[in-house]
Image (cartoon, rainbow, N blue to C red):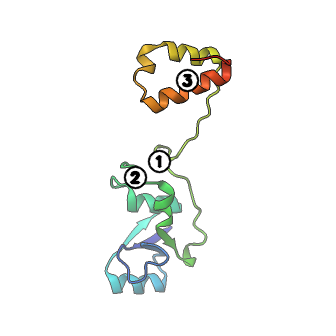
Amino acid sequence: MRVNVIGPNLPDQSKGSFHVHKDTCRDGIRLDRMTGMGDIVEVETKADAVLFVYDNGILEEGADWLSCFEDLYFCPCCSDLPDGEAPIEYRRVEVTLELRAADLERILASDEVFDNLDYGAQSELRRAVNELTGGDA
């Protein structure tokens, strides 16, 4: 779908810093003429529009993908545009590790790993080992 991404610094930013309209939408054409800040771009998903706006280093600097997504207001004329997904490099992944007590003891015994942790992480690791082993690490 060809859309007009208009912004930033719009007169009304209550819905987002950028407004996205179909390129043929009269409201979008009027807003683009009024502000002179529109860019026509071909997108398949809303995520593509987010990348168009923010794939300029902001995301690489640790900006949260979701907050960038929420900064764009997709007008009703774009209601049939699917959300899409964040590119893999911007997805937050939660990893759950299941470690056995022996694994934790091995980490504690490894000076190379343990000594490179800050004091808080060392304390947490000791606490986890003690909890699993019932010992005093």
Q: Secondary structure at mark 3?
A: helix
Q: Is residue 12 above or below residue 46?
A: below
Q: Which residue is labeled 3 in the image? A: 126
Q: Decide which of 131, 45 is in the foreground and name it.
A: 131
Mark 3 and mark 1 lie on one chain; the one further toward the N terminus is 1
Label 1 with label 2: CB-CB less than 8 Å? yes
What distance separates the C-alpha of mark 2 from that of mark 3?
35 Å
Q: Nearer the viewer, residue 42 or 86?
A: 86
Left or right, residue 35 beside residue 68 = left
- As helix, strand or loop, the secondary structure at mark 1 comes to helix
Q: Label 1 is placed on what type of residue?
A: Tyr
Q: Nearer the viewer, mark 2 or mark 3?
A: 3
Determine whether the residue tagged by mark 2 lies in a helix, strand or loop: loop
Q: Which mark is residue 90?
A: 1
Q: Nearer the viewer, residue 58 or 131?
A: 131
* Residue 96 rendering spot, x and y as whole percentages: 62, 33
Is 122 or 91 nearer to us in this picture? 122
Quadrant for the C terminus, please.
top right
Cα distance in 3D space between marks 3 and 1 = 32 Å
- In the picture as drawn, the residue positioned furthest to the front comes out as 136
Categorize mark 3 by other alpha carbons within 10 Å: few (<14), some (14-19), many (20+): some
Residue at screen point 41% across, 66% down = 41
Q: Residues within 10 Å of mark 2 (few under 14, many from 20)?
A: some
Q: At x 43% / y 14%, what residue is drawn?
A: 111
Disc 2 designates what residue?
A: 59
Q: Say what amino acid the circle numbered 3 marks.
A: Arg
**Relative to 69, 94 lies left or right:** right
For label 1, the crowd category at 10 Å Cα-Cα, with few meaning under 14, some 14 to 19 and many 20 or more, is some
Residue 58 spot, x, y in % from top left: 36, 55
Residue at image coords 52%, 63% = 46
